[in-house]
């Protein structure tokens, strides 16, 4: 998928009812977060989870490849919430340009499963580097149990081109392989989204880990 298509997808999602409320995973993951701190969101989409975390008192850096839709969403939040959020354009295909031990929390909802293995490994290593000691990393990804898995054109193991989008599908074992430097708190394939729940998909990867 080219970059213009990503922008169009954001606009399409911003029109959905579920884009106005926090994701299911955000409401689950927050139970594992420290009571406050600096939170980096990778792939904020239309911005509803960033608003949710800011409402709960976190200082949020909401990042995405395209940020216009996010800024429009944030404009609808209260002034107090807006003051807790800053937005930044980040291309996850490039190294994360943050200092070591910068964040208490890194959060990623359906944004880490678009990359080849080498890039995926680099992203996880970057996240480990920028997390503070005892910081929390919570992420949510596609699963190899997804009905789409192994359709389309295979690029590499668990990585396929489907409808012009390159998608990686994580299993519990492959997820663990990226988490060798972290301590696992939660890891299962019981994740849901409002969009997928409507079509009977209930098996996305949920993970919450710490930098010990």
Image (tube, rainbow, N blue to C red):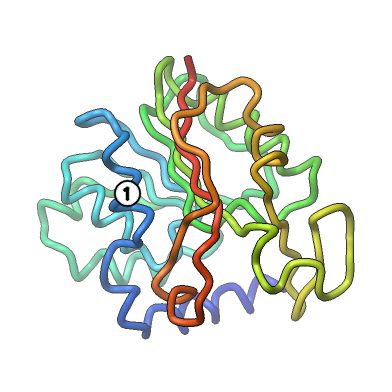
The residue tagged 1 is 28
Seen in the picture, residue 32 relative to 15 is either above or below; the reply is: above
Coordinates of residue 160 in the picture (x, y in percent): 81, 65
Q: Measured from the top left, where is residue 55 in percent x and y?
A: 16, 51
Above or below residue 24? Residue 186 is above
- The residue at the point 65 percent across, 40 percent down is 175
* Residue at 31% in and 33% down: 38
Name the residue: 65% across, 23% down.
180
Q: Quadrant of residue 158?
A: bottom right
- Which quadrant of the rendered structure holds the N terminus? bottom right
Name the residue nearer the viewer: 104 or 192: 192
| Label 1 packing within 10 angstroms: few (<14), some (14-19), many (20+) | few
Residue 60 image offset from top left, x and y in percent:
31, 44
Residue 1's place in the image compared with 180, above or below, is: below
Residue 86 picture location, percent across and down: 32, 48
Taking 123 as reference, is 140 above or below it?
below
């Amino acid at each position: 998928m080219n970059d213009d298509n990503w922008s169009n997808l954001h606009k399409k999602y911003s029109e959905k009812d579920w884009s106005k409320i926090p994701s299911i995973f955000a409401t689950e993951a927050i139970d594992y977060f420290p009571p406050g701190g600096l939170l980096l969101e990778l792939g904020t989409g239309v911005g509803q989870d960033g608003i949710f975390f800011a409402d709960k008192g976190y200082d949020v850096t909401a990042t995405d490849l395209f940020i216009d839709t996010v800024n429009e969403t944030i404009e609808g939040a209260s002034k107090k919430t807006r003051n807790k959020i800053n937005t930044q354009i980040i291309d996850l295909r490039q190294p994360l340009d943050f200092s070591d031990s910068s964040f208490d929390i890194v959060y990623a909802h359906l944004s880490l499963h678009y990359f080849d293995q080498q890039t995926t490994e680099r992203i996880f290593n970057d996240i480990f580097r920028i997390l503070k000691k005892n910081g929390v990393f919570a992420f949510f990804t596609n699963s190899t149990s997804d009905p789409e898995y192994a359709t389309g054109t295979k690029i590499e193991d668990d990585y396929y081109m489907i409808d012009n989008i390159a998608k990686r599908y994580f299993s519990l074992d492959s997820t663990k392989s990226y988490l060798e430097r972290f301590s696992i708190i939660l890891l299962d394939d019981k994740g849901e989204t409002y969009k997928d729940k409507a079509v009977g998909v209930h098996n996305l990867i949920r993970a919450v880990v710490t930098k010990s």
